Image (spheres, rainbow, N blue to C red):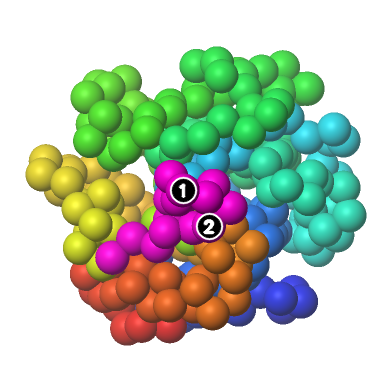
């Protein structure tokens, strides 16, 4: 099933066999719905904690319906697709590594959906800090499946001189951030039962199209070649 603005990738390496590239992060929602089964644990790396509650409940878990819903009903700031996935029954718990809290993001360890389902939200500013939480690693070890998600703006930092100017990370810093010492078990658990990889490029948060393309090239070497052992997209 093809959706506008979403590039599907066949991955032959360690971890998921399917990947998806797109610009607005909220388009991850229909991609996750393309891989049904027991609700998966979502592992997401972002600059922002996209943990705001959606204003409107999602229309079930049909991919086409969720694609329309993501484009027309979710926040244009791309901050509520994660909890929408919980509402839709696609995701059980969330491990979110990010640094900024947008307005409306839930700062709670447990979140209850409209249907009364309780979900755990594990948050940390770095993977190193997350690895200090045994509950997060236990949830990951016991998850029936995972979804792995990246937002490219995770690998850029606002300039101290001008907060509207993004400073892209070099490949070495991206590597150190995603693969700190002691993270082997985390990645083994994440990739062993990973259904899909989603990757949002969001050029508006990365300094524009050209800067985002350059940053994606650096990040792709670490994520696809080094982490997944797959070819570059």
| Residue 196 drawn above or below residue 161 | below
Q: Is the Cβ of the residue at disc 2 closer than 8 Å to that at disc 1?
A: yes
Comparing 33 with 126, the one in front is 126
- Which residue, given by chain and number where applicable, does mark 1 sit on? 161
The residue nearer to you, when weighing 101 against 85, is 101
Q: Please say whether residue 87 is visible from this viewpoint.
A: yes
Q: Can residue 198 be seen in this snapshot? A: no
Look at the numbered disc 2 and give the secondary structure of its residue: loop
Looking at the picture, how far across and down is residue 164, in whole percent? 58, 53
According to the picture, the residue beneath numbered tag 2 turns out to be: 165
Q: Residue furthest front?
A: 161
Q: Which residues are magenta?
A: 156-170
Q: Where's the C terminus, which quadrant?
A: bottom left
When asked about the image quadrant of residue 66, the answer is: bottom right
In which quarter of the view is residue 112 placed?
Answer: top right
Residue 149 located left or right of residue 106: left
Left or right of 135? Residue 92 is right
**Residue drawn at the location 54% of the way across and 79% of the way down:** 210
User: Which residue is pictured at 53% across the width and 57% down the height?
Assistant: 165
In reply to whether residue 8 is colored magenta, the answer given is no
Would residue 75 appear left or right of 133 to someone viewing this image?
A: right
Q: Nearer the viewer, mark 2 or mark 1?
A: 1
Query: Dot 2, how many residues are within 10 Å of its Cα: few (below 14), some (14-19), or many (20+)?
Result: some
Residue 172 relative to residue 62: left or right: left
């Amino acid at each position: 099933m093809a959706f506008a603005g979403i590039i599907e990738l066949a991955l032959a390496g360690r971890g998921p066999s399917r990947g998806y590239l797109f610009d607005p992060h909220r388009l991850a929602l229909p991609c996750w719905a393309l891989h049904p089964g027991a609700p998966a644990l979502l592992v997401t790396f972002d600059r922002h904690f996209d943990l705001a509650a959606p204003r409107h409940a999602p229309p079930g878990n049909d991919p086409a319906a969720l694609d329309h819903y993501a484009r027309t009903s979710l926040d244009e700031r791309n901050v509520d697709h994660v909890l929408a996935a919980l509402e839709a029954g696609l995701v059980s718990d969330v491990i979110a590594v990010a640094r900024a809290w947008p307005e409306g993001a839930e700062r709670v360890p447990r979140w209850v959906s409209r249907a009364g389902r309780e979900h755990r939200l594990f948050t940390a500013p770095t993977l190193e800090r997350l690895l200090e939480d045994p509950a997060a690693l236990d949830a990951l070890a016991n998850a029936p499946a995972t979804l792995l998600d990246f937002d490219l703006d995770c690998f850029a930092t606002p300039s101290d001189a001008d907060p509207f100017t993004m400073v892209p990370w070099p490949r070495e810093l991206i590597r150190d951030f995603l693969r700190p010492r002691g993270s082997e078990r985390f990645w083994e658990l994440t990739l062993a039962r990973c259904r899909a990889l989603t990757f949002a490029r969001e050029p508006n948060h990365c300094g524009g199209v050209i800067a985002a393309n350059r940053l994606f090239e650096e990040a792709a070497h670490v994520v696809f070649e080094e982490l997944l052992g797959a070819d570059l997209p």
